[in-house]
Image (cartoon, rainbow, N blue to C red):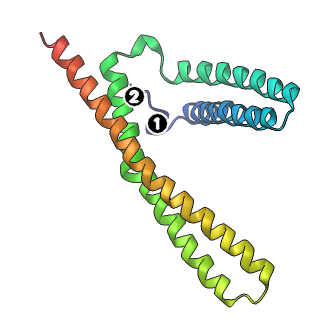
Amino acid sequence: MTLHPHHSDSPTLANLGAAFADEAASHVKYLHFATLCREQGDEETARLFEETAKQELKHALAHVELLYPRSQLTPQHVLEMAIEGEAHEYSTMYPSFRDAALAEGEALAAAGTDSRQDESDTRSEDFRKLLALAAKRFAALTGVERRHCEHYRAALAATNSTTDK
């Protein structure tokens, strides 16, 4: 039995995977919102977002427990899954995101050249800068995810050498 939701034809597993991703993203997003509110002096709203973030994390953990039941996992198995995930991020996901951002930036640059309106040119330039920053970030994350993958591989090798004895 494969545990990874992306390797199954089950709509239920796909829905659990989507719910997990959304709850986990909401957790991080709400922590970000809390920081923003606190920076702007709104402590009450910051605390509200932090409390909601805690609840979203609990929801995400409940979903992940169904997707990856503890009774079916070993350190070797979770390391293999982590390697697969990190390798996907550095070899496929972030490089394709970077390529798309660069391609989109080029299209916007061409469209901006044809524009005669100062306001449009300013927005286009701001967006080009944002896209360039995103492309740079995706390129940097490719290296970070590669290092994560290598750390997991080393841990898996160490775990395998310990269990082989």
- Would you identify the image quadrant in which residue 83 lies? top left
Residue 53 relative to residue 71: left or right: right
Which residue lies at the image location 87% right of the left edge and 32% below the top edge? 42
Say how many tags the image has. Answer: 2
Q: Disc 2, disc 1: CB below 8 Å?
A: yes
Question: Residue at label 2?
Answer: 2
- Give the quadrant of the C terminus: top left
- Would you identify the image quadrant in which residue 130 lies? bottom right
Give 49 or 126, whichever is nearer the viewer: 126
Residue 158 relative to residue 78: left or right: left
Q: Secondary structure at mark 2?
A: loop
- Give the quadrant of the N terminus: top left
Q: State the mark number for residue 39.
A: none
Residue type, mark 2 in image: Thr
Residue 71 at x, y percent in the picture: 43, 10
Graded by Cα atoms within 10 Å as few (under 14), some (14 to 19) or many (20 or more), the crowding at tag 1 reads: few
- Would you identify the image quadrant in which residue 163 lies? top left
Rendered position, 50 above or below 162:
below
Residue 114 relative to residue 163: left or right: right
Which residue lies at the image location 48% right of the left edge and 16% below the top edge? 69
Rendered position, 163 above or below 157:
above
Question: Residue at label 1?
Answer: 8
Which residue lies at the image location 61% right of the left edge and 18% below the top edge? 62
Residue 57 at x, y percent in the picture: 65, 23
Residue type, mark 1 in image: Ser
Rendered position, 43 above or below 70:
below
Residue 78 at x, y percent in the picture: 37, 23
Q: Earlier in the sequence, mark 2 or mark 1?
A: 2
Q: Secondary structure at mark 1?
A: loop
Residue 96 at x, y percent in the picture: 45, 59
